[in-house]
Amino acid sequence: MTFPILPVVAAVFLCAPLGLPAQSVFSDDPAQKFERTSFQTRQPWNPQGNLRADVAMVYGIDPTLPDRVKSWREHGYRVHLMTGVSWGEYQDYLYGRFDGVNHEDNAQTDRLGHKISHGRDVYYMCPADNYGQYLCVGVQRALDAGVEAVHLEEPEFWARAGWSEGFKREWQAYYHEPWESPDSSVDAQWRTSKLKYFLYRRALQQVFDYVQAYNQKTGKSVRCYVPTHSLINYAHWHIVSPESSLARLKGCDGYIAQVWTGTARTPNDFRGVRKERTFETAFLEYGAMQNLVRATGRSVWYLNDPVEDDPQHDWADYRGNWESTLTASLLQPDVWQYEVAPWPERVFGGRYPRNVPPEERKPIPPEYATELQTVMQALADMKQTDVQWDCGTQKIGVLVSDSLMFQREQPTPSDPDMAHFYGLALPLLKRGLPVTPVQLENVTLPGFLDGQRVLMLSYQGQKPQTADVHGALTDWVKQGGVLVMVDDDLDPYNRVREWWNEDGKNERTARGNLFETLGVKDDDFAGEADRMVAVGKGGVVWLRESPVKLARSAEGDARLAGIVQTAAAKVSLEWKETNYLTLRRGPYVIGAGLDESVPGEPRVLRGCFVNLFDPDLKVQTTVALTPGARVFLLDLDAVKAAPPTVLASACKALADKGEDGRARWTVEGVGETPGVVLISSAKAPRTVRLDGKTLDSFTYDDADGLITVRFPNEARARELSLDY
C-alpha cells in the first residue's frame, strides 16, 4: 500500500517509572513472543506511533534504518524490517550507483512508453537478475541492526506494463524467442503475465536465500514474510503478483494480508447493481489470503487500516469502513495475528479530508482514537479455541486461481468488475453463508480440501496452471464432494497455448480436460440446469452460463443459490439462509448485519455485552444485527478470569503482581488521546491511583461489577492501581 511522505521526527526516549530501564517495561510481557499484533512505520519511536503492539515493523532500508530500529527496541518492541520489493527509494540501483550500470530500462513501462511510477523518481521495477542482489544489500543493514524478521512487501507487476527493454530481455531469456507485444493476442498477454509472475518469485527467492545463508552463518533464525494484497484485489486492480506460489519457496514463512478500506471499497456487481460493498469484499479478500497458507505450515497476519491511502475522505467514512474491514477479518477464526495499522502517525497525527482548505481539516476525533486503541489491544487476545458459528450453511467454497491476474488487459480482458468471481461468491455471502475462496493451486496439498463439501468453479477469467489440480479435484469429488461448474466455454483465453490443449495443437478447453479427468461427458448434463452427474460418492453440476451474466442480472443470484442448494442437498448438507453472520471466539462475539439479503427480522443477541466499537464501553443486554450493523462484543458472562481483571482498555495494560497484593497494572498508550480501562471487580475500590496520584475520574457499576477508569493517555509507562 502507499506510504505517506512524512517528515522524520526525532526519537523521544522513554523515561521509565519505578526505576526500571525503558526497554524492560513491556518487553518482559511473556505473550509478546507470539507477535500477536504489529504495525509498520517509517519513523523512529514517537508518541503518536506508540501503539504498544508486540512488533514495530520499521519501513525502508536507507541509512537511517539502524537508528530507527534502535529507538523502537529501546521502547520495548520486537522489531522487524519491512521494505518494498517492486518499488522504493532505490535510486542507487536505478541510476547505476550500485553496480555501475544504469537500470532505468528496467522500470515497468506501458505501451505508450511511459514509466509506471510510485512517486517522483520511484518506479515500479521489472526485477532483473541482480535486482534481488541489490535488495540484499539493504536487508543486510537490517540484519546488522538485529531485526527478527524481514517483510518484503508488494511484489507487483502492473498488467498494463511489458514494453520496457528490460522486460524484453527477460522474455528472450525465459521463452527463448523474440518478444511479443502483450496486447497482440490473448496468448501473448497470457505469456506476458506468466513471465511477470515468475520474475518477482525469482527476486524474492534471492532475498530468502540470502537471509537463510545469514541464519546458517550466525545461528540466528530471522524469518521472511511477504505483505501482499489479496489475489482478488490484485486481479481487480490489474496487477500480477506471485501470490500462492510464494508459499512453496524455501525460506518464506508466510504473508501479511494487505486488506483495507482502499482495496475493499472497490465496487462490484450484485443483482445488476454496481457499488461499494466494503464488508463483503473484505470478507472474501481475507478468506482468500487465509487459503494461501492453510495446510502449508505458513502463517498469515491480517492488516487493518483505520484511515486509508486516499486522504480525501472524512473521519466518519474512515471509521465506518474500518469497522467493516475489521469485522470481516475477525470472521476468519483460523487467523489470530494482526497488523493493527500501517503508518500510525498518519492516523493519530493526520488531518482530513485533504480536499478542503487546511483550516477545515480535522484531527482524529477523540472517541475514534479511544475506540481504535481498545480494539487494537483486544486483537492480542484472539487466539481462542472455542469457535462457534451462527450463520447460514457452511462448507461451501469458490475455487480461485492465481491466473485471475493473467487475463486483465488487452486485447480481450476479462470483466473489469471481476463479476466472474463475485457472481459466484456474493449470492451465497449475501444469504449469510460464509463462503470461502479456495486456492486452486493448493488443492493438491494433503488435507487442503478437508471440510469443503460443495465447490463452485468457473474457468471464465481464470485457468488452471497445472494438470495435477484436476486429479486432486476428481479425488475430492469421488470421496463425496459436489462440484458446481458455471461456465459457457466462451472465454477467449481457452485458446492460449497451454497444457490442456497440448500447446495449441487441439481445441480442448480447460473445462473439457477437467470433465475428462472426472470421467463425465458434456452430453451427460442435458436437461435441467441443476442436473447432477454422479462421480464416485459425489457428483458434478454444470450450469452452462457466464457468472458475469448472473452478477449483472436481478434474478441471477437466486438462480445460482437454488442450484447450490440442490447440490448441498445431494451431500446431506442442511441449507440455511440468514441476514447476518455471527461468530463466537472464546468470550468475543463478532457480528455483521447484511443488506441486500434475505427478508426477515434482524438477529437479536441477548446477554451481557460490551461492544468494543463503543468508546464508552457501556454494557448492553440486547444487540440487534440490523442491515449494515458491525459489532465486536465482549461477552461478560463468558469471561473466566477472576476479578479484579482488566476486560478492555484503550491503552496497553500489563498486570503487575506486586508483593503487597494490590491490584495494579502498567499502562501506556498513544500520547494525548483519551484512555479508558474497564475492570471487573467484586466491590467498589476505595481509591484508584495513576502514577501515584488519586483519580476521581472513575465509576463503579455495582449491578455488573465493573470499574470504568478514564484518564489522558501518555506515551510512557505509568502504574494504575486499586485500593480496597
Image (tube, rainbow, N blue to C red):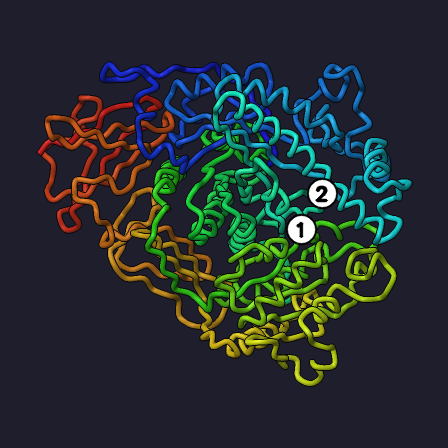
Residue drawn at point x = 28 percent, y = 28 percent = 667
- State left or right for residue 489 relative to residue 15: right
Q: Write down the quadrant of residue 655 in the picture.
A: top left
Residue 110 image point, x, y percent: 82, 38
Q: Label 2: few (<14), some or many (≥20) within 10 Å?
A: many
The correct choice, above or below, for 717 with respect to 241 in the image is: above
Task: Check the picture and name the quadrant holding the C terminus.
Answer: top left
Q: How crowded is mark 1: few (under 14 residues within 10 Å), some or many (20 or more)?
A: many
Q: Residue at x 84, y 45 (%)?
A: 182
Residue 375 sits above or below residue 600 on the image? above
Q: Is residue 681 above or below residue 22?
A: below
Look at the numbered discs 1 and 2 and tell me whether their residues touch, using CB distance below 8 Å.
yes
Residue under pointer 1: 402
Q: Residue furthest right?
A: 178
Q: What residue type is labelled 2?
A: Tyr
In front of the other: 647 or 487 = 487
Secondary structure beneath dot 2 equals helix
Q: Which residue is drawn at 22% across and 17% down?
A: 18
Along the polypeptide, which appears first: circle 1 or circle 2?
2
Residue 419 can be seen, yes or no: yes
Left or right, residue 385 beside residue 119: left
For residue 522, side relative to residue 539 (left or right): right
> Is residue 351 in sight in this rendering?
no
